Image (cartoon, helix red, strand yellow):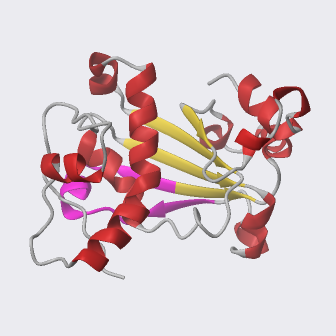
Amino acid sequence: MPTYLPETQRLQPTLVPEDGWSSYSATRPLVPQLNATTLAIISKRLSQALTVMLALQKFYTIEDLGRMTDINVHVIGAGLYEVPADAVWEELFHLLPSLRKLHVAFIGPEVGDIIKEEDNMTEFDMAVCPGCKRFEKRRIYSYGMFPYHVYLDKVKQATPLQAAPPTIVAAFNSGIQATPLQAAPPTIVAAFKSGM
């Protein structure tokens, strides 16, 4: 699958428009030779990072976003949809110029079906584009092969990066909207108590 992320370094945060992919692509132009199929793939892959950015915009002012140097994202209930997380999360660097370190923790029992056991609770420095490399930006992925409430207990003895409270907790395709709040599983309760 082709990967394309614009490498432009901006001085101010770029807000993600709320009205869809066409508005977003107008703010972050893609090379015109990409066909509709490739654009659909890119849009699907970028949706996780852009959803997180949109949520950050709801909870932080543009001034706060402009000062953020570290973001710690916990993706709970991670599975096959979330874990092949190529370079799409790097887009947060391109939208938030002050961001220097991005940690994305993929957490969930299904993670064990995707990564090797010895990679559990391990941090991986991922490659970044030349522009981000020039500014010494770090994109770090880590994995937790258990439900979120178990992960939170385990990270108390983990590295400082993993033990840091999340900036944001995201659950993609979780099905939680069909669960009454009083029947929320322990993972959802833990997410609300995580200090984010």
Viewer-proximal residue among 121 and 38? 38
Residue depicted at x 46% and y 41%: 52
Query: Above or below — where is 113 with respect to 191?
Result: below
Where's residue 126, x and y in %? Answer: 44, 63
Query: Above or below — where is 4 with respect to 188?
Result: below
Q: Give the range drawn in magenta.
A: 123-140
Viewer-proximal residue among 67 and 39? 39
Q: In this view, does 159 lie to the left or right of 134?
A: right
Where's residue 39, x and y in %? Answer: 27, 70
Residue depicted at x 23% and y 48%: 24
Residue depicted at x 24% and y 62%: 5
Quadrant location of residue 12? Answer: top left
Where's residue 9, x and y in %? Answer: 14, 46
Query: Above or below — where is 58 with respect to 51?
Result: above
Q: How many labels does the image show?
A: 0
Query: What is the residue that sits farthest to the left in this orientation?
Result: 32
Residue depicted at x 30% and y 78%: 37
Q: In this view, does 144 lie to the left or right of 91?
A: right
Report the quarter where the N terminus lies. bottom left
Where's residue 119, x and y in %? Answer: 70, 68
Q: Is residue 28 magenta?
A: no
Viewer-proximal residue among 78 and 104? 78
Report the quarter where the C terminus lies. top right
Query: What is the residue that sits farthest to the bottom in this orientation?
Result: 1
Q: Is residue 133 magenta?
A: yes
Quadrant location of residue 143? Answer: bottom right
